[in-house]
Image (cartoon, rainbow, N blue to C red):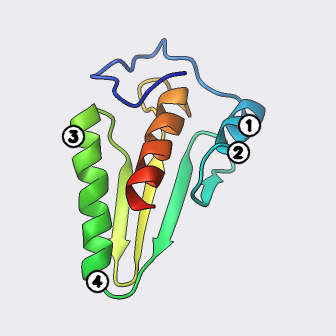
Amino acid sequence: MTTCNIGGGCSADTPVLDRDAARAQMAGLSGDWQLSEDGTTITRRITVKGFAKAVYLANLAAWMADRHGHHPDVAFGWGYCSVSYTTHEAGGLTEIDIACAREFDALVA
């Protein structure tokens, strides 16, 4: 199984998951992740009370991204933080994204 500790290991040759494989991999995630319509991205939106908690979640995602060299798209505002993973270099969703989502879930559990 691929871990999220990739150290810049993404490339155009990184295997992309098809929709069925993505759904199967997502079954192992504890958070409420959603697969995009085109099957290239997974997103988890977390609802919180207030602005500060949303900022803390965004900072947690940023800290984890810097640690692993794999950077999600993060959006936040009053009452929410949204984290989306895709492997841009490969052009879609990879096992690396699933592993990072799994680790993010563990950090916010």
Question: Which is more N-terminal, label 4 or label 3?
Answer: 4
Which of pointers 4 and 2 lies earlier in the amino acid sequence?
Answer: 2
In the rendered structure, find residue 66 and report the number of the disc placed on it: 3
The location of residue 97, given as percent across then percent down, is 49, 36
Mark 4 Cα-neighbour bin, 10 Å: few <14, some 14–19, many ≥20: some
What residue sits right under mark 1 in the picture? 24
Does 28 appear above or below 13? below
Q: Type of residue at label 1?
A: Ala
Amino acid type at mark 4: Phe
Label whose residue precedes the other's in the sequence (3 or 2): 2
Q: At label 3, which amino acid type do we have?
A: Asp
Amino acid type for the residue under numbered disc 2: Ala
Question: How far, Cα to Cα, is label 3 from label 2?
Answer: 26 Å
Alpha carbon distance from label 2 to label 1: 5 Å
The foreground one among 26 and 86 is: 26
What percent of the width, then of the height, locates residue 70? 33, 35
Measured along the vertical axis of the image, is residue 25 above or below residue 108?
above
Pointer 1 local density, CA inside 10 Å: few below 14, some 14–19, many at least 20: few
Residue identified by numbered label 4: 51
- Res 81 quadrant in image: bottom left
Q: Residue at x 73, y 41 (%)?
A: 23
Q: Which residue is mark 2?
A: 27
Local crowd size for mark 3, using a 10 Å CA cut-off: few (<14), some (14–19), many (≥20): few
Q: Nearer the viewer, mark 4 or mark 2?
A: 2
Task: Answer with the quarter of the image where residue 12 lies.
Answer: top left
